[in-house]
Amino acid sequence: MGLLIINKKEARFNFIEKIKKGSIFVVLTDTIYGLSCVFDNFDSLNRIKKIKRIENHRPFIILVSDFFMLKKYFNVSVSQEKLLKKIWGKNERPTSVILDAKDYICNQLKLDKKIGVAVRLPKRNFLIKIIKLLGKPLVSTSCNITGEKFLNNIKDIGCFFKTNIDQPDIILKLEGERPGKRPSKLIDLRDFKNIKIIRD
C-alpha cells in the first residue's frame, strides 16, 4: 500500500476508520516519532515488527486516553493511581510505566505476563483524541529499524519509507510541532515499595 501523508490541519480525523481496520501510522508522540496501530490487531502488530525488524516478543508501549481506559486493561492500586496522576501531570516529563497488565492485553500482545507491559497517558491532545475516537488503546514504538538511530525528522521518515519495501500506511504530518531528542522515561511500578527506573 502506498504512503498516505496527511496534514494535521486537513485531516479532520477522517483517517480513524483506516486505523480501526488495521492501518499502521506514523505520528509524533510526546517525545519522538512513533509507529502505531490498534493494540488488538495481530496482523498490524506483526507488520510493525517486520518494519522495525524486531524480535517476536519485544514489548511495545501502550497508549491510553484516560484513567478509565487504563484500569480497563491494567491492574492499578489506589497508591499507584495517585502517583500516576502526579507523574502524568501537565508539567511533568513524558513517562511510561510498567504495570501489571490484565490477561486480555497480554494475550493480545502475545506477552508473558511476568515481563509486564509499559503504558503511558499521552500529553498531546491530538494523540488522546485519536485514542478516544478509536475507543481502544494504541501500541507505540520508536520509528526506526531496531538498533539504528531514531527517524525523528518528518522529511527523513518520508524518504526512508518511500524506498523501504516494508512501510506504514499513513504518516500524520503535524505542522508546527517539533519532536524531542529522546524517548520517554520508563519506570517499573509493579512493586510499589521498590520502584525501579528502567530508562532515565
Image (spheres, rainbow, N blue to C red):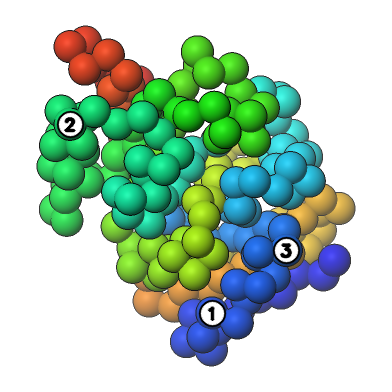
Residue drawn 39% across the image and 50% down it: 69
Disc 2, SS: helix
**Which three-letter amino acid code belongs to the residue tagged 2?**
Val
Q: Which disc, if any, is residue 21?
A: 3
Residue 136 seen from this side: yes
Q: From this view, report whether residue 104 is shown above or below residue 27.
A: above
Nearer to us of marks 1 and 2 is 2
Q: Which disc, if any, is residue 13?
A: 1
**Which three-letter amino acid code belongs to the residue tagged 3?**
Lys
What is the C-alpha distance between the residues marked 3 and 1?
Answer: 14 Å
Where does the image place residue 181, in percent across and percent down from the top left? 38, 47
Q: Are marks 3 and 2 in contact (CB under 8 Å)?
A: no
Residue drawn 29% across the image and 57% down it: 123
Which residue matches tag 2? 78
What is the C-alpha distance between the residues marked 3 and 2?
Answer: 35 Å
Q: Which disc, if any, is residue 96?
A: none
| Residue in front for this viewpoint, 83 or 158 | 83
Where does the image place residue 74, in percent across and percent down from the top left? 40, 34
In the figure, is residue 7 to the left or right of 194?
right
In the figure, is residue 68 to the left or right of 16?
left
**Which three-letter amino acid code belongs to the residue tagged 1?**
Phe
Q: Residues within 10 Å of mark 2 (few under 14, many from 20)?
A: few
